Image (cartoon, rainbow, N blue to C red):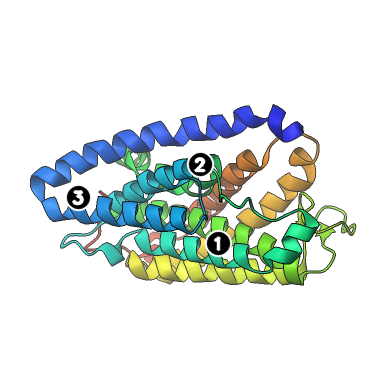
Amino acid sequence: MTQLKLAWQSKLVLLLVVPAVTVDVMVKSQWWASQQGPVAIWTLGLSVLLALVTWKLHAATPFAAAAGAVITSNLMFSTLVVPYEPWHTALVPVLAVSVLAFATTALGRTRKERLGTAEKREGRSAAQVTANLGVAALLTGELGQTWIANNHWFSQPDIGQMVLLAAGLAALAEAAADTVSSEVGQVFGGRPRILINLRKVEPGADGAVSLAGTLAGVLAAGIVAAAGTWALGGNGTMFLASCAGSVFGFLFDSLLGATLEEWGWLNNDSVNFLSTASAAAFAFGVVALLPHTAVGHLPAFKLG
């Protein structure tokens, strides 16, 4: 009943992300179609293909798959390099998130159904997908670029781009870590504990963590961070910052779940959105506070 009362929060997450991302994709699609047609074709085509596969595997509802396609297109347009290579865009970490989420959601499904914690058969909703991927899209898209262009904090544009990329990658890695830790913990974690008081609870309880789930989440974060760092041409700083941010984010998710969600103030979509945002903020702080010589630069890279 509480989740139904808080359904407005899921709609708010959609409104915060989908309109801005959709407009961004439309503008960039038109521009790239007029300049380099294959860029627009490959970006939109691969995003739609991923959405169709996700939908056919029942990992997402039709609306969720459509939202995912728009967000993936935005992330790809925002992180492409010239000459264009699709595997050197944010498509790679998005694929890593999708594969990890699908595999661990299917893991031990019979046990999860007995516990009443299994994902719905039709897959994740549009709000769930947006809550997990939306922060990364906003950061690397037009909103983030406008902020970097008008900010004199960074001595070089490449530094600002590195910070945005690390923050966006941390948000994606957190989404994977949160899902994997929860799904694996329900199967192998035994009775989890509430983070704030270490009290044992039933699997699936808001804010519950287990050792097995936490380790699996850290591993998932590392996989997505490594995939993204390679695809985006980043360095060790980007990898470490996105890993650190993602781990902070999914622990923050547990804290929110055990408090504000348990008290009926937040629903799961808003918790996920805020957790990815916290992961991005943590990674942003890690990179931004380092000496610029330690951050490095991306000589051939430009956010689009």
Q: Looking at numbered disc 3 in the image, what kind of residue is underneath it?
A: Ala
Q: CA distance from mark 2 to mark 3?
A: 24 Å
C-alpha gap between disc 1 and disc 2: 15 Å
Residue 291: image location, x then y, percent:
43, 61
The numbered dot on residue 60 is none
Question: Which residue sits at x=47%, y=44%?
Answer: 64
Residue under circle 2? Answer: 126
Question: Percent x, y for residue 255?
Answer: 74, 49
Q: Nearer the viewer, residue 267 or 168?
A: 267
Within-10-Å neighbours for mark 2: few <14, some 14–19, many 20+: many
Going 42% across and 69% down the picture, which residue do you hit? 227
For the residue labelled by badge 1, is the local secondary structure a helix, a strand or a loop? helix
- Asked if disc 2 and disc 3 are in contact, CB closer than 8 Å, the reply is no
Q: CB of mark 1 within 8 Å of CB of mark 3?
A: no
Residue at numbered disc 3:
40
Mark sitting earlier along the chain (1/3): 3
Indicate the quadrant where residue 30 lies.
top left
**Tag 1: residue type?**
Ala
Measure how far apart labels 1 and 3 are at the Cα level: 27 Å
Q: Position of residue 84 (x, y in %)?
A: 19, 61
| 231 vs 145: above or below | below
The disc at residue 101 is 1
Q: Amino acid at mark 2?
A: Ala
